[in-house]
Image: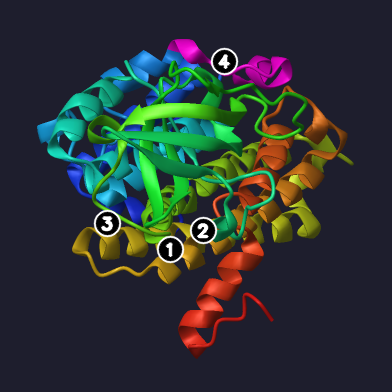
Amino acid sequence: MNLTTEMTDYMGLQGLLTDEEKLVRETARQFVNEHVLPIIEECAQTETFPEHLIRPMGELGFYGSNLPEKYGCAGLSNVAYGLLNYELERGDSGLRSFVSVQSSLVMYPVYAYGTEAQKEYWLPKMATGEVIGCFGLTEPDFGSNPAGMRTRAVREGNGKWRINGTKMWITNGSIAHVAVVWAKTDEGIRGFLVPTDTPGFSAPQMKGKWSLRASVTSELVLEDVIVDEEESLLPGVVGLKGPLGCLTQARYGIAWGTLGAAEMCYQTALDYALNRIQFDRPIAATQLQQKKLAEMVTELTKGQLLAYQLGRLKDAGTYTPAQVSMAKMNNANIAREIASAARTILGANGIMGEYPIMRHMANLESIYTYEGTHDMHTLIIGQEITGIPAFRS
């Protein structure tokens, strides 16, 4: 198997795809092979994001790719968007996270909740990568319970709002030009588009991570930040359903993306097992290693088919947030397990930067937790099938 050109496809997934969806996947894989894989290990080691790739990805239509062409986007199917995430995370979770935040957590709320003027101003610039966005929901004391947020926005009169608060674990924060900030108001939770050069806004970068090292993670600090209602307030939604609607979009992309990381780990382990000679034969000839590889490809294949069906439901407009939770929960979990099994096949070499496995393992630890922890998604599914919320029990 060629690690760089062929997708792991045990059940003929690609036969279910349209020509456009195949082209999107192939284009993204070629981009990752040529521009990401040669540099990503150094980026992770030095804790830097490859910012020089931002505009080229925009030129290829990677941002907001499932949003309408009217706003400079590609207008692709949700399955195509999922495949894009798959291939990007095959390179690195940090790359997929950048595109996911830009697309699902910034461009989507502008499209879904913004005015026509806001859409026309922001979306074309975001689609090209000229403008980078970030999403401010999580706070230092409120992760799984976003309703407890302390960030507050108050009307100042004359069409102005004053925002005060702090956000934490914000992807792209320190390099963003605009932040979608969710804040409590007297009328409920509201979303605001806050240019990052607004007085009182700062975004110090968080360093020292052992995971997602090739991704920019930041804190957002808003101290008496004044914004204009017409330009900044997203008028189309009030309440927690606004940010949760965005998270559903992002979780869908993650359900695909984690499988890309899993595929890279599986293919690396398979290639290594076929070529690593011990006791005069490749270790792939042993029952123990074949068992690991068989289980890995089985779980990867099940995850692919789950993500594909969810994508078709999303394109038909018949999916539910709990179905997205199932795909995110399952696929992040099996990717984590595949990465761990792959590391054991490589033995001591599995921890070396020469191979991508340890980097993916560390990244998947974050993804297992972010955009809704594994446990919270379990409870979301539990509530849907029983009708009983267990979040506070």
Q: Quadrant of residue 120?
A: top left
- Under circle 1, the secondary element is helix
Where residue 187 appears, as percent x and y from the top left, is: 37, 57
Q: In the figure, is residue 27 to the left or right of 367?
A: left
Disc 2 marks which residue?
328
Structure colour scheme: rainbow
The part of the chain drawn in magenta is 38-52
Q: Earlier in the sequence, mark 3 or mark 2?
A: 3
Disc 1 marks which residue?
324
Q: Earlier in the sequence, mark 4 or mark 2?
A: 4
What is the distance, in whole Å, between disc 1 and disc 2 at their CAs? Answer: 6 Å
- Under circle 4, the secondary element is loop
What is the distance, in whole Å, between disc 3 and disc 4 at their CAs? Answer: 31 Å
Q: In the figure, is residue 125 to the left or right of 360?
A: left
The amino acid at mark 4 is Pro
Which residue is drawn at the image coordinates 61% and 58% (left, top)?
144
